[in-house]
Amino acid sequence: MLKQESQHTEWKETWRDDYLRWVCGFANAQGGRLLLGVNDKGQVVGLPEAAKLLEDLPNKVRDLLGIVVDVNLHTEGELHYIEVVVQAYPNPISYRGHYYMRSGSTLQELKGAALDRFLLGRHGRTWDGVPLPQFSLADVSAPAMARFRQLAQRSGRLDAETLAESDANLLDKLRLKEGPYYQRATALLFAADPQRFVTGAFVKVGYFESETELLYHDEVEGDLFHQVKNTLDLLLTKYLKAVISYDGIVRVETFPVPRAALREALLNALVHRDYAVTAPVQIRVYENRLRIWNPAVLPEGWTLDTLLGAHSSSPYNPAIANAFFRAGEIEAWGRGVERIFAACAAAGTPKPLLRYQPFDMWLEFPFDPAYLKVLRAGQGQSEQVTPEVTEQVTEQVTEQVARLIVALGDQTLSLQELMQALGLSHRPNFLALHLRPALVAQLIQMTVPDKPQSRLQKYRLTPAGRRWLARQA
């Protein structure tokens, strides 16, 4: 019995010309072997016409696929079987006008966006670099170009002389033109209405009461720079509720998702998505989480672990990514996902969840239970926290408050010392999710209760806080 089928091995009991699809699929993937005269259990059953196939198959593959394969005759006992060895080809291979790809242990016919992606890749092209004959300089939006110049000037990644040039010259310097035609990226970056040229080039945002119950929604259109800015503003002003606190006389708004993480997630979704897929980027907001979907394609050989670990920059849309880099909106080091997770860690919010299937990327931000309880209890409207507040924000100690109590112990610490002890750097989130709930629950108290904003203010455990700590021990 032979080893089991895999991405590189396929068994067939007999030969039919239709099996040339499998040969085509191997050639378009990573190569492989087609074994003839072997049943689906891996047992050699023999191939009566083996001698004839040994002579016919090389010619048939050459004539119908245009490639050369090795055809080998093997014997097990008195039974003959044939091995067709197919090399991976750098150019696209078709069978009767159809393209096939071996994926895992299955054969897939490439169609639509998947076929476009495959053909472009085999010819060394990217989707955003394809010329767009119907787009002209007259379609370029003056406000979009002005916005880009302002961002690029602030970033310092384009010199003043380049930025002072005409729109036509600046677009040429950004390598957004090929011969007489502008590339697809130009329409997405600088057209007033990119959807005239690229279907689905917008963002859809919705607030959901459940997975199926949509309460309200919005669509954000315009050039990509506009979409990033306006989507972020829309989420922070309409879809996400802030917990309000005060740092001295300064009003501080704490959102369930750190602004830096949300902005980076939007940039990743819009810059690196597959625009050959006609569905828009979709953002679903729930009471306790926010989820961003985009049609993404990872570089060949990458897995989710590759994306989550340290990796080089390999943008799916290099022309779009270059413009955003010159504008100072992204880096060129492949650290987008890392920056999202780092921003959440610094703010003390839950770790995001990332899920990927071919052409589907979901990034979910769970909301902190402490944030939700503070919000539901109406603490967002409080102007200051004092030890006399008796309304209970939590029925039980949250993870954040528990960490604060353990860090405080028998000590008397200032706010800054507490943040250092917890390894936090984002003051608004610390106030909203750690300090405020602990004070409201009367587990900690101020050393200068009459002057909550005193520069000498420190915090220590109350008798209730000490009892809770003793129970944990």
Image (spheres, grey):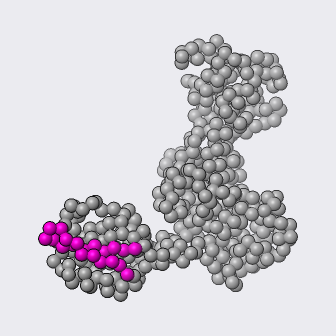
Q: Can residue 229 be seen by looking at this rendering? A: yes
* On-image quarter of the N terminus: bottom left
Where residue 371 sits, quadrant-wise, is top right
Image location (x, y in percent) of residue 109? 40, 72
Reply above or below: 282 against 46. Answer: above
Where residue 471 sits, quadrant-wise, is top right
Q: Residue at x 62, y 49 (%)?
A: 338
The reply, left or right, for residue 301 in relation to residue 77 is right
Q: Residue at x 29, y 82 (%)?
A: 57
Residue 76 falls inside the magenta stretch: yes
The reply, left or right, for residue 76 in relation to residue 152 is left
Reply above or below: 346 against 213. Answer: above
Reply above or below: 61 against 9. Answer: below
Main secondary-structure element of the magenta-colored stretch: strand
- Residue nearest the viewer, comparing 118 with 112: 118
Q: Can residue 376 be seen by looking at this rendering? A: no
* On-image quarter of the C terminus: top right
Image location (x, y in percent) of residue 185? 66, 71
Residue 246 falls inside the magenta stretch: no
- Residue nearest the viewer, comparing 80 with 130: 80
Image location (x, y in percent) of residue 187? 67, 72
Q: Residue at x 84, y 74 (%)?
A: 165
**Range drawn in magenta:** 68-87
